[in-house]
Image (cartoon, rainbow, N blue to C red):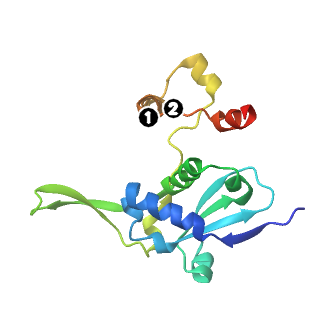
């Protein structure tokens, strides 16, 4: 069996902090509670998000982990690295409640304390479906329909293999 190793990654943390500040308000006061690690060794995934066990919290001081496949990371351009880290951060859900702010005259969201394990959960993907099912049955589920709308409204449709084709033609 091939050896597996982990190494804390300041590089991934730097990417994550920028994304957190732009897109993840529920993580802004919790960034120091997330461990960002490269995973070395054979793997069939590019990234993983995980809520720490009680022992992992005790041993590391972290509440959450993001693991990035080190080999995959080497081959991703900055845009794809951002997308991968953003994807993993989207898995982290935090308990919140709505409160009416009299001064602002609007409802605001208040996050429960970041250092309490029960305030964190791992969010599943919005869509899990096979392209063949969509081809045969269309946008048959609300989640799939919402996902398709997001794809249609995305500012740029990048082909996954665009970078590889550019490299091959040079």
Q: How far across and how far down the image is residue 46, in percent?
A: 67, 52
Q: How far across and how far down the image is residue 92, in percent?
A: 49, 59
Figure label count: 2
- Left or right of residue 49, residue 6 in this image: right
Q: Residue furthest front?
A: 170
Report if the CB atoms under discs 1 and 2 are less than 8 Å apart: yes
Q: Residue furthest right?
A: 1
10 Å crowding of disc 1: few (<14), some (14-19), many (20+): few
Q: Secondary structure at mark 1?
A: loop
Report the front residue among 49 and 16: 16
Q: Residue furthest top?
A: 136
Distance, label 1 to label 2, CA atoms, is: 7 Å
| Residue found 59% across the figure and 66% down from its top | 11
10 Å crowding of disc 2: few (<14), some (14-19), many (20+): few
Q: Quadrant of the N terminus?
A: bottom right
Whether residue 51 is situated above or below residue 156 in the rendered picture: below
Q: Secondary structure at mark 2?
A: loop
Q: Identify the image quadrant of residue 22.
A: bottom left
Q: Say whether residue 3 is visible.
A: yes
- Left or right of residue 136, residue 100 in this image: left
Q: Quadrant of the C terminus?
A: top right
- Residue 157 is labelled as 2
Report the front residue among 135 and 6: 6
Report the front residue among 86 and 105: 86
Q: How far across and how far down the image is residue 130, in percent?
A: 63, 30
- Residue 154 is labelled as 1
Whether residue 140 is situated above or below residue 82 in the rendered picture: above
| Residue found 62% across the figure and 27% down from its top | 131
Q: How far across and how far down the image is residue 160, in percent?
A: 63, 36
- Residue 130 is labelled as none
Q: Say whether residue 94 is visible.
A: no
């Amino acid at each position: 069996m091939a050896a597996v190793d982990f190494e804390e990654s300041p590089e991934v943390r730097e990417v994550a902090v920028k994304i957190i500040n732009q897109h993840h308000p529920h993580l802004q006061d919790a960034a120091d509670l997330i461990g960002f690690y490269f995973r070395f060794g054979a793997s069939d995934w590019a990234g993983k998000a995980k809520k720490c066990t009680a022992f992992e919290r005790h041993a590391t001081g972290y509440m959450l982990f993001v693991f990035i496949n080190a080999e995959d990371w080497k081959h991703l351009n900055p845009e794809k690295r951002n997308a991968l880290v953003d994807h993993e951060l989207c898995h982290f859900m935090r308990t919140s409640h709505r409160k009416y702010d009299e001064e602002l005259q609007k409802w605001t969201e208040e996050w429960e304390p970041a250092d309490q394990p029960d305030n964190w959960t791992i969010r599943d993907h919005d869509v899990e479906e096979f392209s063949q099912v969509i081809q045969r049955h269309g946008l048959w589920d609300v989640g799939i329909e919402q996902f398709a709308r997001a794809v249609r409204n995305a500012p740029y449709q990048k082909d996954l293999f665009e970078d590889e084709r550019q490299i091959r033609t040079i």
